[in-house]
Image (cartoon, rainbow, N blue to C red):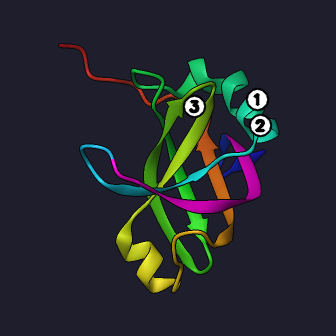
Amino acid sequence: MLRDGVPSLDLEFSGEVVHWRGPSPYHFVAIPEDECRDIEAVSTLVTYGWGVIPVRAQLGATVWTTSLFPRKGRYLLPVKDAVRIAEDVEVGETVRVRLVIELERAERPAG
């Protein structure tokens, strides 16, 4: 798909909000397997290291930029507290999420 003249992968899915109690506590939505396959197919075009993939995400009316994290063959979408609060979302809820991954890698400065 073209978005503002830039090729992109647009995905929409539902997933459960989970709390990660690791060294940096955070909330995530695990991306379903089918969508993970689509993301993996374009990952080399967009990753900026460690398999992390920049995305524009939308949950309800809230849109934010973040990066997907690879985990055990799948990807996790971080959900900021500000997003959860704005959309009145609690841990354990199933939410509908939209992702846009721009496929045109930005040129990096030489150096």
| In-front residue for pair 50/105 | 50
In terms of secondary structure, where does tag 1 sit? helix
| Residue 22 numbered mark, or none | none
Question: In the orientation shown, which residue stands out farthest toward the left?
Answer: 111
Amino acid on which disc 3 is placed = Glu
| In-front residue for pair 91/99 | 91
| Residue 104 numbered mark, or none | 3
In the rendered image, residue 14 lying in the magenta stretch gets the answer: yes
Question: In the orientation shown, which residue stands out farthest toward the right?
Answer: 34
Q: Are marks 2 and 1 in contact (CB under 8 Å)?
A: yes
Q: Residues within 10 Å of mark 1 (few under 14, many from 20)?
A: some
In terms of secondary structure, where does tag 2 sit? helix
Q: Residues within 10 Å of mark 2 (few under 14, many from 20)?
A: few
Bounds of the magenta segment: 8-21
Which residue is label 2 attached to?
A: 33
Q: x, y (%) of residue 107?
A: 40, 25
In terms of secondary structure, where does tag 3 sit? loop
Which residue is label 1 attached to?
A: 37
Seen at 60% across and 71% down, the residue is 59
Q: Quadrant of residue 12?
A: bottom right
Question: In the orientation shown, which residue stands out farthest toward the top?
Answer: 111
Amino acid on which disc 2 is placed = Glu
Position of 107 relative to 3 (above/below): above
Amino acid on which disc 1 is placed = Arg
First in sequence: mark 2 or mark 3? Answer: 2
Q: x, y (%) of residue 41?
A: 72, 23
Q: CA–CA distance between discs 2 and 3?
A: 24 Å
Can you tell which of label 2 and label 3 is closer to the viewer? Answer: 2
| In-front residue for pair 22/69 | 22
In the rendered image, residue 86 lying in the magenta stretch gets the answer: no
Q: Is residue 103 left or right of residue 87?
A: right
